[in-house]
Structure formats: C-alpha cells, structure tokens
C-alpha cells in the first residue's frame, strides 16, 4: 500500500481525499491510502482524515506519496521538499511556473527514483475524448480556442494557469511554436486577456485566448477549420461512469506500480515539458510587448 498525504485543501485537495477514501473497485487506485492532509490553516478533520504537519509527513515511513493540490505559486516548493525526502509526487497542473523549474523537478525525481506525475484531467473528459476522435484524420487549416473564466489569485500568468487549453491544442495538433503573444490587463478590475499566436509543424496558425475576469463564465469557444469541414462546437459526448480525477488517480497508481509502459511515460514527459516551454515563451513575448507599450 502507498500511504499518502494531501497538501492543500481546496477543490482539488477535497476530491483527492474523497477518491482515495472510495477508490475505483479492482483498480490500481486501491493501492493508495490517505494518511493525513497538510494545510496552512488549522482545520478540523476533512472527510474523517486528520491534519498533520509537513515534518511529520516527510519523516513517516508509512507515507510514500504526496498530492500537491495548492495554488500554482506554491507547487514548486511543495514538490521539491517531498521529492527530496524520497516521496512520490502527484501534482495538479501546472507542475511549475517556468519550464526550467519543471525540468529540474523531473531530474530530481529521476535522481531519487520516484514518480513525478502532473495531473491532466482535461485530457480525460468525455468531451475531449470525443473531440480527439472527431479531429483524427482531418487536416487543420486554421484554429481558434478562446477560454473565459473567473480570476483566482496565486494561479500566475495565464499561459501557465491555462495550461489545460494549451495541452488540448498540443494533444490535438502536435508540437507547436509561438509566433506572437500579448497581454491586456486591468489590475483594478481583476481582468486579464492573453492572446497567443501559435503555429503547427505544418505552418497552420492557431490562436489561443485566455480571458479571466469577475463574472466571466467558465466556457470554451472553438473554431477549427479543416480541409474538409469546420468545427465550431465541442461535439456532444456522454458523461463517463468513472470521474476524471478518479481516472487520473488510477493512472498515477499504475505509474507507482510500474504498470505504465516506458514510451508512454516519455511521451507524457515530453508533452508536459513542451507545453511549459510554450507557456514560458508566451509569457516572455507578452511581457516584452507590455514593456514596449509602457
Ligand atoms: P482552490 O482555490 O480551491 O484551492 C487552492 C489552494 O488554496 C489550496 O491550497 C487551499 O488550501 C487554499 N485555500 C482555499 N481556500 C483557502 C482559504 N480560505 N484560506 C487559505 N487557503 C485557502 O483551488 P483548486 O481548484 O483546488 O486548485 C488547486 C490546484 O489544482 C491548482 O494548481 C489548479 O491548477 C489545480 N487543478 C484544479 C482543478 C479543479 O477542478 N479544481 C482541475 C485541475 C487542476
């Protein structure tokens, strides 16, 4: 069994505890057992699970795994401390706020001989699986993905907090390059809009917009023009019986048990690092643009 601790009790932390308390029957996730949670707040028991200190979690032999579910800005520090202690880590996306940090953390995991897993539930939704099937075999001419949502503090630059959308684009259309990026921000009104121009290996343009602000609904607008047709809506898909966080828990557990093929692990690492590299570049270009405007 892999004793685990959950770090950060927000939405994701709550779900991790819930899923470990009731894992998918007969799945690898049954090998995980939650031993405690860590929070910067002093909290009562959560779903019957007790709060413990970081020191306790790091030194206990029965705790082998940490789930890092804090706001993005605190991921690096938490991942590092658990990897250093030889614990496996599952982190909610994005792993880090720079590409270089992610490479360092992955190297550290390798050096310690432990699993470092970045959750990507957006690839596990029924909507996305259907979209991927529908896109397969079509040749993209031009694409557009616009996300809107409410702004949260501590989640960082939109190319990182919105990495799920970038991961969609990379998973659908292959590795990309950034040709331009800009950022509009109104700090007083807690509003920001990032526009990134990307290009596929076949030199086809993709526009990715992340727009965050008070009252903006969480929504995705797509327009993918192919050689044969245009897609302007996510295809309807039937909700799957196994939740997306549970699917991710099963994948992580399979990694712990050495059940995931090496080439799948490599491909996943390559995709994660590629997306973070693109996010870095988008941030750089956006900041350059803002500096020129000032
Ligand atoms: P959240 O805002 O619910 O919680 C984030 C952090 O804030 C947690 O560490 C929590 O302990 C802390 N927090 C919450 N309320 C607090 C309070 N009143 N005082 C002090 N601290 C408080 O965010 P979340 O949705 O759980 O996201 C956590 C991580 O999971 C992020 O990295 C996010 O990108 C990732 N993630 C979340 C989801 C999701 O569906 N929620 C999906 C994918 C990835």
Image (cartoon, rainbow, N blue to C red):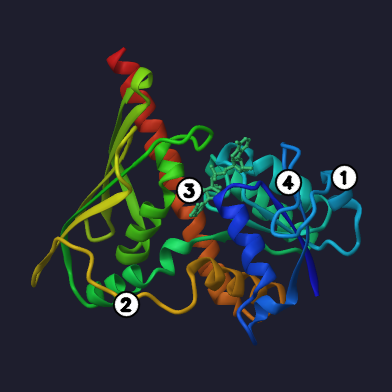
Does residue 106 appear to the left or right of 96 in the view shown?
right
Which disc, if any, is residue 276? 3
Q: Nearer the viewer, residue 142 or 190?
A: 190
Q: Mark 4, mark 2: which one is toward the viewer?
A: 2
Return the disc, 1 or 2, that comes first in the chain's sequence.
1
CA–CA distance in space, label 4 to label 2: 39 Å
Mark 2: which secondary structure? loop
- Whether residue 117 is visible to the viewer of this picture, yes or no, is no
Label 2 CA crowd tier, 10 Å (few <14, some 14–19, many 20+): few
Classify mark 4: helix, strand or loop.
helix
Q: CA distance from mark 1 to mark 2?
A: 44 Å
x%, y% of residue 198?
27, 48
Give the mark nearest the N terminus, 2 or 3: 2
**Closer to the observer: label 1 or label 2?**
2
> Dot 1 corresponds to which residue?
55
Check disc 4 and report the residue beneath it: 80
Upstream in sequence: badge 3 or badge 4: 4
Location of the N terminus by quadrant is bottom right
Regarding residue 60, the answer to whether it shows in the image is yes
Within the image, what quadrant is residue 170 found in?
A: bottom left
Name the residue carrying label 2: 238
Q: Position of residue 113 (x, y in %)?
A: 77, 64
Residue at disc 3, secondary structure: helix
Q: How many other residues sit within 10 Å of disc 1, few (<14), some (14-19) or many (≥20)?
A: few
Discs 2, 3 touching: Cβ within 8 Å: no
């Amino acid at each position: 069994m892999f004793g685990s601790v959950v770090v950060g009790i927000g939405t994701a932390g709550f779900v991790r505890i819930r899923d470990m308390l009731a894992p998918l029957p007969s799945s690898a996730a049954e090998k995980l057992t939650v031993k405690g949670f860590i929070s910067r707040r002093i909290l009562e028991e959560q779903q019957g699970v007790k709060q413990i200190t970081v020191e306790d979690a790091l030194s206990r032999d029965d705790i082998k795994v940490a789930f890092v579910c804090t706001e993005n800005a605190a991921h690096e520090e938490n991942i590092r401390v658990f990897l250093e202690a030889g614990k496996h880590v599952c982190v909610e996306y994005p792993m880090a706020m720079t590409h270089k940090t992610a490479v360092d953390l992955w190297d550290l995991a390798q050096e310690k001989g432990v699993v470092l897993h970045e959750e990507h539930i957006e690839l596990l939704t029924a909507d996305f699986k259907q979209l991927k099937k529908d896109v397969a075999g079509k040749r993209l001419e031009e694409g557009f993905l616009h996300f809107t949502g409410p702004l949260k503090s501590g989640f960082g630059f939109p190319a990182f907090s919105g990495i799920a959308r970038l991961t969609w684009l990379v998973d659908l259309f292959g590795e990309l390059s950034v040709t331009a990026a800009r950022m509009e921000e109104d700090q007083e009104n807690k509003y920001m809009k990032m526009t990134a121009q990307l290009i596929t290996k076949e030199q086809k343009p993709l526009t990715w917009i992340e727009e965050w602000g008070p009252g903006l609904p969480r929504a995705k607008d797509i327009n993918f023009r192919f050689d044969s047709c245009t897609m302007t809506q996510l295809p309807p898909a039937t909700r799957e019986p196994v939740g997306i966080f549970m699917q991710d828990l099963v994948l992580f557990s399979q990694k712990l048990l050495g059940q995931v093929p090496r080439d799948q692990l490599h491909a996943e690492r390559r995709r994660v690092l590629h997306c973070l590299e693109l996010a870095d570049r988008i941030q750089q270009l956006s900041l350059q643009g803002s500096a020129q405007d000032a």
